[in-house]
């Protein structure tokens, strides 16, 4: 078998501890993914990415660095990858989605911090993820209090650059985000030693837009009944989008979409047409967090759309490609990114409008509003989300969970009851 | 009544290029298989392996012989 231990050792990883993670992944993946029936053949590529998750892509990043290239680690869909790629660097998502990393985070963070932050900090400090080792610099942002303080702790171990996200969406806030993008551009130029030209930025706006288009095409297939791909598979693809090579990712996702569109024409689905159609809204699900999708879909319902940062929020709204100067391009980037409806904004009516629109577009029977434990923003906004859905007559349930399996059976029971109610 | 024991078969490779090559050949020959992370019971190294059901095993062995892909063995693992 491929032996990546030399590479991991060279990255300063704790091989013994990392080995425990390697041991757990195959069973979890087999159980959630390979046990599914009638999966699209195009999932082969994404299965391959997972099988080689700490091998092939990290090896590509190592090669990039050997040639003098830089790697930027990011944690939020607000960070504009376009700017990073335009300087010849590579952006890679770093959000931690495994319980394995949580205890490492709890060594330095309060236990009542959300599992995504704890896992991300733990993956770095415990030296058990090659991506966290490979990034020359992390780009943090001010989406929540937990993250803001976590950056300061991480900054003791790795350089962290923080972008200040506005809290409102007025004209001056969009302008302020444009200024933040400019500052990031300066930082990226300083770290890479490369100038960001309007030509390079235009090219990379197109590159990332192509990724968005591929994901939008994928999600579009999920509007069909019977649905041609499971929610678990769609979630996996979204998760991989954060760290795969953008060009290759778009091409493989489009290949899969060709197959899915054929399936739709043949009415070949992965669930019966009468299976309940579920939307999941709330906090992001970083790889390998497949917990809720797996529970819902093994209860017989299909997850057809995610209104999350590992769902629609990631790819909705392409960047306007007509800008020819850096100022124009930064303006169009700022406008596009400020359309992402994160719960860190007040007010955030745009998110509720999105949810109500997506319910119609994806013919959703019921919504599960789910947030990671201790996420005050999404948990609090849940009140307004549920109120709007109830007013519109759309069944909704709220869940709060973490990465552990301890509450899985309780959640299963609640999901089963919710699905039964949809059938009444 | 005792449940019948079911076994899965994992084809192991020296590197992912060989794995992807065989995957392509098996698909061409109509032999069903899945790309899987290698379970610890099959090898102590991480990375790609090809997962087969018992009924596909003979057909897969023929393809391996004919296409000359380098493999590092086939592990038989009891399904839990």
Image (cartoon, grey):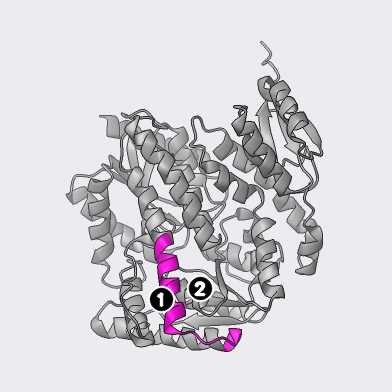
Asked if the magenta segment contains residue A194, the reply would be: yes
Q: Which residue is mark 1?
A: A202
Location of residue A200 in the rendering, given as x and y in whole percent from the top left corner: 46, 78
User: In this orientation, does residue A261 appear?
Assistant: yes
Query: Left or right: where does residue A289 sit relative to residue A169?
Result: right
Q: Residue at x 50, y 58 (%)?
A: A241
- Disc 1 to disc 2, how far (Cα)? 31 Å
The 10 Å Cα crowd at callout 2, few under 14, some 14 to 19, many 20 or more, is: many
* Picture residue at 80% right of the left edge, 57% below the top: A16
Compared to residue A294, the image places residue A281 above or below, namely below
For residue A80, say whether it is visible. Answer: no
Say above or below: A39 vs A136: above
Mark 1, residues whose alpha carbon is within 10 Å: few (<14), some, or many (≥20)?
Answer: many
Q: Position of residue A270 (x, y in %)?
A: 42, 32
Q: Residue at the location (53% across, 55% down)? A: A240
Q: Which residue is mark 2?
A: A147
Which mark is nearer the camera, 1 or 2?
Answer: 1
Q: Earlier in the sequence, mark 1 or mark 2?
A: 2
């Amino acid at each position: 078998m491929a032996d990546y231990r030399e590479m991991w050792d060279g990255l300063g990883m704790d091989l013994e501890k990392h080995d425990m993670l390697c041991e757990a992944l195959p069973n979890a993946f087999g159980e959630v993914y390979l046990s599914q029936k009638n999966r699209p053949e195009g999932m082969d590529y994404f299965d391959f990415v997972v099988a080689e998750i700490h091998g092939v892509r990290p090896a590509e990043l190592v090669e990039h660095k050997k040639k003098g290239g830089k790697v930027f680690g990011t944690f939020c869909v607000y960070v504009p990858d376009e700017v990073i790629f335009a300087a010849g660097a590579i952006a890679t998502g770093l959000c931690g989605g495994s319980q394995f990393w949580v205890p490492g985070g709890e060594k330095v963070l309060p236990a009542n911090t959300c599992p995504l932050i704890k896992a991300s900090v733990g993956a770095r400090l415990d030296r058990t993820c090659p991506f966290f080792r490979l990034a020359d610099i992390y780009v943090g942002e001010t989406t929540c209090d937990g993250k803001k303080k976590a950056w300061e702790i991480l900054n003791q171990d790795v350089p962290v650059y923080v972008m200040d996200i506005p809290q409102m969406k007025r004209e001056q806030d969009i302008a302020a985000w444009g200024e933040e993008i400019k500052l990031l551009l300066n930082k990226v130029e300083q770290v890479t030693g490369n100038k960001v030209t309007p030509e390079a930025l235009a090219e990379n706006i197109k590159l990332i837009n192509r990724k968005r288009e591929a994901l939008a095409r994928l999600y579009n297939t999920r509007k069909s009944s019977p649905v041609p791909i499971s929610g678990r598979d769609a979630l996996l693809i979204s998760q991989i989008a954060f760290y795969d090579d953008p060009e290759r990712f778009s091409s493989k996702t489009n290949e899969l979409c060709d197959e899915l569109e054929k399936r739709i024409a043949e009415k070949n689905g992965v669930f019966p047409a009468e299976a309940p159609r579920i939307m999941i809204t709330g906090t992001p699900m970083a790889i390998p967090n497949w917990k809720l999708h797996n529970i819902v879909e093994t209860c017989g319902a299909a997850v057809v759309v995610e209104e999350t940062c590992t769902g629609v929020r990631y790819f909705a709204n392409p960047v306007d490609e007509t800008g020819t100067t850096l100022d124009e391009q930064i303006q169009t980037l700022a406008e596009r990114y400020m359309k992402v409806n994160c719960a860190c904004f007040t007010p955030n009516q745009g998110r509720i409008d999105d949810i109500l629109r997506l319910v119609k577009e994806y013919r959703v029977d019921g919504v599960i509003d789910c947030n990671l434990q201790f996420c005050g923003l999404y948990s609090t906004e849940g009140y307004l989300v549920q109120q709007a859905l109830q007013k519109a007559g759309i069944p909704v349930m709220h869940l709060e969970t973490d990465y552990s399996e301890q509450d899985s059976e309780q959640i299963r029971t609640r999901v089963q009851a919710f699905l039964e109610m949809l059938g009444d | 009544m005792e449940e019948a024991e079911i076994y899965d078969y994992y084809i192991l490779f020296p590197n992912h290029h060989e794995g992807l090559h065989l995957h392509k050949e098996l698909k061409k020959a109509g032999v069903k298989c899945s790309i899987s992370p290698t379970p610890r019971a099959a090898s102590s190294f991480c990375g790609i392996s090809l997962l087969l059901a018992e009924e596909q095993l003979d057909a897969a062995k023929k393809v391996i012989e004919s296409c000359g892909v380098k493999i590092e063995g086939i592990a038989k693992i009891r399904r839990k």
